[in-house]
Image (cartoon, grey):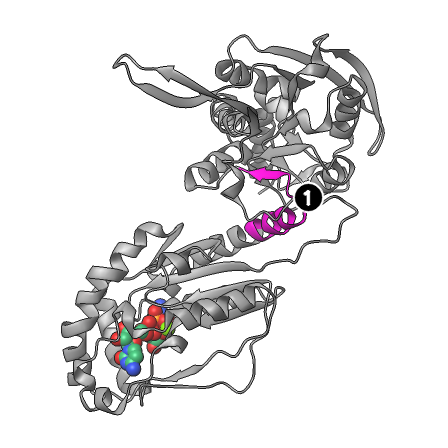
């Protein structure tokens, strides 16, 4: 029995396969969760993020809006009520509001009055946005709420700072006195922080130390949200793009290979690490067969057998940098080559090809680390199709892709799969990826000593100043 593996599809929100002629799927908003202890600066951070994302439709949803209103009996004993316990919130209503917003429907979100401990029905509905920020002390605690999020942030501020801010805020804005605040803090706020909030930090993708004081972190996060939004939007349109899950390790490797000052040695080292991850991810898209084997203990283990009819095809020169990683993962794999000449911005000429004779019966990994306009990749894929390779048997492995290249490939070849590690923002007038990393092949093979150019440039600058 041969079936297609799909274990890697969940790295970005992906709707079902859509052919170019099919109607575009409903665009789901990008959901960011912001958690952290009381007075850590969650609301402040959210407001800063929102003001920087002014060109997007951003909706802020506060977990506070979903506090249960206190009954008369509970109001009489309000000092015994734990507002920091997960049960203090009506999470069912929160989930249903979030679902509605995610599916593009306007929703009535209650507003909460901290002075009277009551929730008030809102009269005007909140409209869905491109981005939903869900903020609150316990938004990372419940797995159902976490599952709604595309990005999770934890604001990590020192407990002493939080307590002093809380005293100030609650006495000024929430109708409390210092004694109330301190009693509530010792009895409920701190124990619940230790039991529910602090442990939820492990689910965060990003931790912001010092909250709103940390301008650098906020700028980086906004930049990261913009990259993610672009990826998210492309993944929503095309189901055949797979972006390896972004971690700070991967972001760090990208930072190094994109840096103009990185030496050739480091460039090769970190590019190789990233290439290996992309190749491993690409292998997950190959068909497999179920296989039973016997272990040395005499037990039967039901596993899978790798697909063996494979080959690689590298686009000379930069694609050749990916061959070693492919060989390291697939022992003895055949690798063909294609040389395409760039005549002008949109003209491409096939100069040379050497492909396995039986390529039509193989799954093909097409290797090119940078996808810019997509003209070269279209030329390469057209050649593979003319050799009889089914479109669905081609997996394009890539490190950095521009949205223009993705549109070009996905529209023309809807059955092709693209595995990449980051999608950049645009192309410049020369059809180079922006921010990109320059000429990949020159930097990888050391054919253009970029660092000596930089040092002569900086010498010039020093001389002039
Ligand atoms: N960096 C900061 N410096 C000084 N005061 C701050 C800072 N960040 C927040 N505050 C104040 O502390 C209080 C709590 O901040 P807020 O953002 O509302 O936290 P949270 O939403 O996590 O409870 C507010 O009164 C706010 O004005
Ligand atoms: N009636 C209420 C409801 C909640 N609280 C406290 O609010 C805190 C959460 O809000 P933050 O803006 O600080 O995140 C939480 O720690 C509750 O103790 C309250 O005092 N009264
Ligand atoms: Mg708040």
* 266 is higher (above) or lower (below) than 233: above
Quadrant location of the C terminus in the rendered image: top right
- SS for tag 1? helix
> Is 321 positioned to the left or the right of 384 in the image?
left
Residue 126 placement (x, y as % from top left): 56, 76
Q: Nearer the viewer, residue 184 or 79?
A: 79
The front one of 76 and 407 is 76
Q: Quadrant holding ligand 3?
A: bottom left
The magenta segment: 227-243
9 or 402, which is in the foreground? 9
Percent across and percent down for residue 199 are: 26, 55
Task: Note whether 234 is above or below 143 in the view shown.
Answer: above
* Above-or-below relation of 69 to 270: below
Q: Give whichever of 9, 170 is nearer the camera.
A: 9
Q: Residue at x 58, y 47 (%)?
A: 14
Report the label total. 1
- Could you tell me which residue is drawn at 28 percent across and 89 percent down? 175
Q: Principal SS element in the magenta part?
A: helix
Q: Confirm if mark 1 falls within 8 A of ligand 1.
A: no
Is residue 132 magenta-colored?
no
Can residue 316 be seen at all in this image of the molecule? no
x, y percent for residue 8: 51, 36
Q: Which residue is mark 1?
A: 403
Identify the image quadrant of the N terminus.
Answer: top right
- Left or right? Give the position of 273 relative to 375: left
Question: Can residue 236 be found in the magenta stretch?
Answer: yes
Asked which quadrant contains residue 463, the reply is: top right
Q: Does the rendering let one see residue 90? A: yes
């Amino acid at each position: 029995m041969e079936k297609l593996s799909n274990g890697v599809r969940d790295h970005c929100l992906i709707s079902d396969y859509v052919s170019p002629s099919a109607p575009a799927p409903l665009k789901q908003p990008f959901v960011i969760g912001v958690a952290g202890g009381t007075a850590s600066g969650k609301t402040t951070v959210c407001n800063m993020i929102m003001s920087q994302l002014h060109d997007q439709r951003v909706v802020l949803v506060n977990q506070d809006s979903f506090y249960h209103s206190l009954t008369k009996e509970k109001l009489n004993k309000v000092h015994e009520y734990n507002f920091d316990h997960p049960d203090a919130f009506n999470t069912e209503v929160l989930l249903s509001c979030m679902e509605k917003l995610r599916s593009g429907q306007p929703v009535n979100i209650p507003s909460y009055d901290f002075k009277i401990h009551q929730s008030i029905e809102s009269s005007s509905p909140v409209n869905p946005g491109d981005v939903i920020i869900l903020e609150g002390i316990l938004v990372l605690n419940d797995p159902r709420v976490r599952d709604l999020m595309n990005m999770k942030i934890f604001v990590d501020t020192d407990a002493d700072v939080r307590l002093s801010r809380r005293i100030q805020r609650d006495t000024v804005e929430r109708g409390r006195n210092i004694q109330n605040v301190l009693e509530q803090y010792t009895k409920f706020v701190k124990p619940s922080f230790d039991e529910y909030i602090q442990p939820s930090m492990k689910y965060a993708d990003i931790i912001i130390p010092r909250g709103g004081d940390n301008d650098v972190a906020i700028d980086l996060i906004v930049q990261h949200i913009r990259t993610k939004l672009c990826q998210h939007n492309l993944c929503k349109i095309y189901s055949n793009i797979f972006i390896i899950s972004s971690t700070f390790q991967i972001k760090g490797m990208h930072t190094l290979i994109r840096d103009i000052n990185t030496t050739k040695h480091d460039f090769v080292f970190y590019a190789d690490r990233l290439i290996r991850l992309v190749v491993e991810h690409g292998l997950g898209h190959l068909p497999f067969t179920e296989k039973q084997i016997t272990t040395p203990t005499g037990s039967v283990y039901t596993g899978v057998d790798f697909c063996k009819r494979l080959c690689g095809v590298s686009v000379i020169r930069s694609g050749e940098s990916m061959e070693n990683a492919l060989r390291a993962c697939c022992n003895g794999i055949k690798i063909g080559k294609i040389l395409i000449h760039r005549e002008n911005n949109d003209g491409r000429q096939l100069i040379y090809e050497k492909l396995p004779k039986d390529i039509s019966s193989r799954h093909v990994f097409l290797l090119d680390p940078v996808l810019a306009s997509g003209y070269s990749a279209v030329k390469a894929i057209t050649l593979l199709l003319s050799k009889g390779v089914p479109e669905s048997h081609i997996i394009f492995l890539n490190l950095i892709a521009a949205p223009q290249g993705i549109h070009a490939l996905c529209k023309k070849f809807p059955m092709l799969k693209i595995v990449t590690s980051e999608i950049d923002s645009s192309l410049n007038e020369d059809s180079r990826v922006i921010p990109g990393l320059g000429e990949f092949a020159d930097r990888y093979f050391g054919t253009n000593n970029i660092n000596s150019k930089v040092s002569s440039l900086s010498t010039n600058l020093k001389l002039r100043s």
